Protein backbone atom coordinates (compact mmCIF):
# COMPACT_ATOMS: atom_id res chain seq x y z
CA UNK A 1 0.00 0.00 0.00
CA UNK A 2 1.39 3.39 -0.98
CA UNK A 3 1.69 6.00 1.76
CA UNK A 4 3.40 9.29 2.46
CA UNK A 5 5.44 9.11 5.67
CA UNK A 6 6.30 12.42 7.31
CA UNK A 7 8.83 13.30 9.99
CA UNK A 8 10.54 16.31 11.49
CA UNK A 9 7.90 18.39 13.23
CA UNK A 10 8.26 19.68 16.76
CA UNK A 11 8.49 22.67 19.05
CA UNK A 12 10.92 25.49 18.32
CA UNK A 13 11.40 29.08 19.46
CA UNK A 14 10.74 31.98 17.15
CA UNK A 15 13.71 32.52 14.85
CA UNK A 16 14.63 28.85 14.93
CA UNK A 17 14.64 26.21 12.22
CA UNK A 18 13.03 22.86 11.50
CA UNK A 19 13.32 20.44 8.59
CA UNK A 20 10.39 18.32 7.51
CA UNK A 21 10.76 15.16 5.45
CA UNK A 22 8.18 13.15 3.53
CA UNK A 23 8.98 9.85 1.88
CA UNK A 24 6.86 7.73 -0.44
CA UNK A 25 6.43 4.28 1.06
CA UNK A 26 5.54 1.51 -1.40
CA UNK A 27 6.09 0.84 -5.08
CA UNK A 28 5.22 3.58 -7.57
CA UNK A 29 6.00 4.40 -11.17
CA UNK A 30 6.57 8.14 -10.71
CA UNK A 31 6.15 10.94 -8.20
CA UNK A 32 4.84 14.01 -9.97
CA UNK A 33 4.33 17.25 -8.06
CA UNK A 34 5.08 17.07 -4.34
CA UNK A 35 4.52 19.69 -1.72
CA UNK A 36 3.54 20.82 1.74
CA UNK A 37 0.31 22.28 3.04
CA UNK A 38 -0.50 23.50 6.53
CA UNK A 39 -3.60 23.99 8.60
CA UNK A 40 -3.81 26.09 11.73
CA UNK A 41 -6.70 25.70 14.19
CA UNK A 42 -9.86 27.26 12.80
CA UNK A 43 -8.21 27.95 9.46
CA UNK A 44 -8.40 26.36 6.03
CA UNK A 45 -5.61 24.19 4.75
CA UNK A 46 -3.23 26.26 2.64
CA UNK A 47 -0.36 25.57 0.26
CA UNK A 48 3.06 26.29 1.75
CA UNK A 49 5.34 25.15 -1.06
CA UNK A 50 5.41 22.74 -3.96
CA UNK A 51 7.95 21.31 -6.38
CA UNK A 52 7.30 19.67 -9.72
CA UNK A 53 9.04 16.72 -11.33
CA UNK A 54 11.03 19.32 -13.30
CA UNK A 55 12.10 21.01 -10.05
CA UNK A 56 9.96 24.11 -10.55
CA UNK A 57 9.04 25.51 -7.16
CA UNK A 58 6.16 27.57 -5.84
CA UNK A 59 5.89 29.22 -2.42
CA UNK A 60 3.21 30.98 -0.43
CA UNK A 61 4.05 34.67 -0.10
CA UNK A 62 4.17 34.31 3.68
CA UNK A 63 7.10 31.88 3.56
CA UNK A 64 9.14 33.19 0.63
CA UNK A 65 12.74 33.76 1.63
CA UNK A 66 12.37 31.69 4.81
CA UNK A 67 11.35 28.20 3.63
CA UNK A 68 13.02 26.04 1.01
CA UNK A 69 11.49 22.99 -0.64
CA UNK A 70 13.65 20.32 -2.23
CA UNK A 71 13.44 16.72 -3.44
CA UNK A 72 15.49 13.59 -3.59
CA UNK A 73 14.20 12.10 -6.84
CA UNK A 74 15.95 8.77 -6.38
CA UNK A 75 14.29 8.26 -2.98
CA UNK A 76 10.92 9.88 -3.80
CA UNK A 77 11.35 12.16 -0.82
CA UNK A 78 10.47 15.83 -0.40
CA UNK A 79 11.93 18.15 2.22
CA UNK A 80 10.88 21.49 3.68
CA UNK A 81 13.62 23.50 5.34
CA UNK A 82 11.99 26.11 7.54
CA UNK A 83 14.16 28.95 8.82
CA UNK A 84 13.37 32.14 10.71
CA UNK A 85 10.23 30.53 12.04
CA UNK A 86 7.46 32.72 13.43
CA UNK A 87 4.61 31.95 15.82
CA UNK A 88 2.20 32.33 12.92
CA UNK A 89 3.86 29.34 11.23
CA UNK A 90 2.36 27.14 13.95
CA UNK A 91 0.14 24.54 12.26
CA UNK A 92 -0.16 20.92 11.29
CA UNK A 93 1.91 20.42 8.15
CA UNK A 94 0.74 17.90 5.57
CA UNK A 95 2.75 16.36 2.78
CA UNK A 96 0.96 16.09 -0.56
CA UNK A 97 1.94 14.25 -3.72
CA UNK A 98 0.59 13.31 -7.10
CA UNK A 99 1.70 9.72 -7.66
CA UNK A 100 1.47 7.56 -10.75
CA UNK A 101 1.42 3.95 -9.59
CA UNK A 102 1.71 2.19 -12.93
CA UNK A 103 3.22 3.30 -16.24
CA UNK A 104 -0.17 3.01 -17.94
CA UNK A 105 -2.17 4.63 -15.18
CA UNK A 106 -3.28 8.08 -14.12
CA UNK A 107 -1.92 10.02 -11.18
CA UNK A 108 -3.65 9.98 -7.81
CA UNK A 109 -3.42 12.43 -4.92
CA UNK A 110 -1.95 11.28 -1.64
CA UNK A 111 -1.71 13.02 1.72
CA UNK A 112 0.52 12.39 4.69
CA UNK A 113 -0.82 12.00 8.19
CA UNK A 114 0.33 15.47 9.27
CA UNK A 115 3.06 16.63 11.60
CA UNK A 116 2.70 19.35 14.21
CA UNK A 117 4.95 22.41 14.06
CA UNK A 118 4.74 24.75 17.03
CA UNK A 119 6.69 28.00 17.18
CA UNK A 120 6.82 29.72 20.55
CA UNK A 121 7.31 33.46 20.92
Image (tube, rainbow, N blue to C red):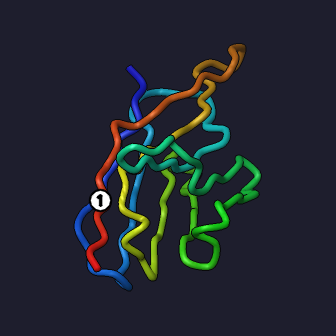
| Residue 10 to residue 110: above or below | below
Front residue of 94 and 32: 94
Report the number of numbered marks: 1
Q: Quadrant of residue 85?
A: bottom left
The residue under label 1 is: 9
- Taking the spot 55% from the left edge, 77% from the top edge, the residue there is 66
Q: Tell which of 83 and 70 is nearer to you.
A: 83
Q: Is residue 56 left or right of residue 24?
A: right
Q: Quadrant of the N terminus?
A: top left
| Residue in view at x 27 percent, y 80 percent | 13
Q: Residue furthest front?
A: 42
Question: Would you call the spot at circle 1 few (<14 residues within 10 Å), some (14-19), or many (20 or more)?
Answer: some
Residue 53 against residue 72 in the figure, above or below: above
* Residue located at (40% from left, 30% from top): 3
Residue 68, image x and y in percent? 57, 70
- Furthest toward the bottom, the residue is 15
Picture quadrant where residue 118 is located: bottom left
Left or right: 95 in relation to 49: left
Residue 14: x %, y % from top left: 34, 81
Q: Nearer the viewer, residue 23 or 19?
A: 19
Amino acid sequence: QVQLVESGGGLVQAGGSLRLSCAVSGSIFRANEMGWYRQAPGEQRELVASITAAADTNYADSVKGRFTISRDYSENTVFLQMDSLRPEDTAVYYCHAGLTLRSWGRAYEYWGQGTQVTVSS
